[in-house]
Image (cartoon, rainbow, N blue to C red):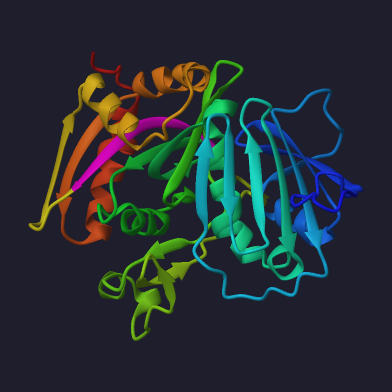
C-alpha cells in the first residue's frame, strides 16, 4: 500500500458480495464483515455473481482508527464527475459518477454503527449515485398494498409520515418514509425504499396510541422526533418495492378538510423536478424514462387537514375502493 494512499485504493478488500438496490445490481468489496451485514439489512443479496453491475463499492475499514461516536454532521462536495462525502476527520467516500464506482475509508467504530449506515451513509450514497444509475429520487413517502403503491409527495411538514402511519393501521405496508427511489426495469416502473423507521414529530402523540405519555427521544434536524419501526414483511417475506399506481401531492391545511383534484402533468413535473439533484446531461437522459412513466400515472393534489386516521379512511375510499388510480393521466 502506498504511504500517501489516503482513501486506500490499494488496500485489500477480500470480502465481496452482490446486491440488488432498487432493481439495480451493485457489488461491495470490503475487509469488514460488519459492513456486509449492514448491506444485507438494507439491500437484497444476489446469490450468483452477475456478469455486470450497475455500480460498485470498495470500502476499506481501518481498525487502527480509534474515532468514536457521536458523529459530526456529514458533508458533500462535488467537482464535475467526482463527489466527495466526509463523515468525520478520517472516514470518507469518493464517488466517480462516470465510472459509477465508489471508494471509501472508515473507522472501525463507524463501520460497526449499522444504524448510522441505514439512516445516513447508504441513503447519501444512493442520492449521489441516483442520476447516473437512472434512479429518480422523490421527496416522498410510499405505502403499498399487495404490489400496488401510492406515492405521497410533499415538502417537510406536509404530513407524509403521519399519513403513512395512519395508512399502516388501515392495512398498508410502509415502503419508504421520506425518500422514494423510482426507476424503470424491463419497461416496468418500480418504486423502492430503504428500511428506515418512520419519523414523527411530537404532535403524533395526539393522534397515535403508540406515543401517548411518551417523549420523543431521537433528534432529527435539530428537532426531537419519535421513531417507529413498522413490520415490513408481507406474506412472510420482506418487501421493499412496489408498482406505483398514483402520485398524491400533499398540501396540508389548518382546517379539517379533504379535497382531491386532478393535477396537470406539467405542474406535477415541476413539483418533481424541483427536488431532483442537479445532474450531468447524461444522467438527466437516464432519468427521463422513469420521469415520463411517473407522469403517466394519475396525479392528484390533496388538500387536507384534521385527524390523520380520518384522512387515511378517505384516501382508501378515494384511491383504492373507487379505483381512481387506474384513470389515465391528464395532459
Q: Which residue is nearer to you in this view: 290 or 237?
A: 290
Q: Residue at x 36, y 56 (%)?
A: 161
Q: Residue furthest front?
A: 4
Question: In this image, 296 relative to 105: left or right?
Answer: left
Residue 203 to residue 309: above or below: below
Farthest-out residue, top: 331
Say which residue appears at 30% left-offset and 75% top-offset: 205
Q: What is the residue that sits farthest to the left in this orientation?
A: 255
How many tags in the picture? 0
- Asked if 179 appears above or below 55 in the picture, the reply is below
Q: Is residue 306 above or below residue 176?
A: below
Quadrant where the C terminus lies?
top left
Residue 65 x/y as whole percent:
76, 70
Q: Where in the figure is residue 204, as x and y percent of width and height?
A: 30, 70
Q: Examine the residues drawn in magenta and state their main secondary structure.
A: strand
Q: Quadrant of residue 185?
A: top right
Residues drawn in magenta:
240-251
Rendered location of residue 72, percent (x, y): 53, 68
**Residue 36 vertical placement versus 326 (above, below):** below
Verify whether residue 244 appears in magenta.
yes
Residue 178 appears left or right of 273: right
Q: Is residue 241 visible?
A: no
Q: Is residue 236 magenta?
A: no
Residue 74 in view, yes or no? yes
Amino acid at each position: 500500500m502506498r504511504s500517501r494512499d489516503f482513501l486506500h485504493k490499494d488496500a485489500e478488500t477480500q470480502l465481496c458480495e452482490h446486491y440488488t438496490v432498487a432493481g439495480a445490481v451493485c457489488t461491495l468489496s470490503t475487509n469488514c464483515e460488519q459492513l456486509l451485514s449492514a448491506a444485507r439489512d438494507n439491500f437484497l443479496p444476489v446469490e450468483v455473481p452477475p456478469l455486470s453491475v450497475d455500480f460498485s463499492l470498495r470500502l476499506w475499514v481501518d481498525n487502527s482508527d480509534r474515532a468514536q461516536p457521536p458523529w459530526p454532521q456529514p458533508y458533500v462536495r462535488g467537482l464535475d464527475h467526482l463527489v466527495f462525502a466526509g463523515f468525520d476527520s478520517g472516514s470518507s467516500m469518493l464517488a466517480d459518477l462516470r465510472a459509477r464506482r465508489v471508494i471509501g475509508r472508515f473507522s472501525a467504530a463507524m463501520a460497526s454503527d449499522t444504524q448510522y449506515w441505514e439512516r445516513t451513509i447508504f441513503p447519501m450514497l444512493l442520492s449521489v449515485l441516483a442520476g447516473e444509475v437512472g434512479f429518480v429520487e422523490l421527496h416522498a413517502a410510499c405505502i403499498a398494498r399487495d404490489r400496488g403503491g401510492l406515492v405521497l409527495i410533499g415538502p417537510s411538514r406536509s404530513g407524509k409520515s403521519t399519513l403513512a402511519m395512519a395508512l399502516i393501521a388501515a392495512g398498508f405496508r410502509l415502503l419508504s418514509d421520506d425518500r422514494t427511489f423510482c426507476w424503470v426495469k424491463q419497461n416496468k416502473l418500480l418504486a423502492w425504499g430503504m428500511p428506515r423507521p418512520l419519523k414523527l414529530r411530537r404532535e403524533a402523540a395526539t393522534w397515535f396510541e403508540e406515543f401517548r405519555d411518551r417523549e420523543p427521544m431521537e433528534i432529527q434536524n435539530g428537532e426531537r422526533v419519535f421513531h417507529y419501526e413498522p413490520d415490513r414483511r408481507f406474506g412472510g417475506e420482506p418487501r421493499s418495492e412496489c408498482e406505483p399506481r398514483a402520485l398524491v401531492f400533499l398540501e396540508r391545511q389548518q382546517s379539517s378538510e379533504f379535497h382531491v383534484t386532478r393535477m396537470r402533468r406539467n405542474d406535477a413535473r415541476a413539483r418533481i423536478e424541483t427536488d431532483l439533484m442537479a445532474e450531468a446531461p447524461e444522467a438527466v437522459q437516464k432519468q427521463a424514462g422513469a420521469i415520463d412513466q411517473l407522469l403517466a400515472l394519475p396525479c392528484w393534489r390533496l388538500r387536507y387537514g384534521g385527524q390523520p386516521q380520518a384522512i387515511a379512511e378517505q384516501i382508501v375510499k378515494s384511491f383504492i375502493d373507487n379505483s381512481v388510480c387506474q384513470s389515465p393521466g391528464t395532459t
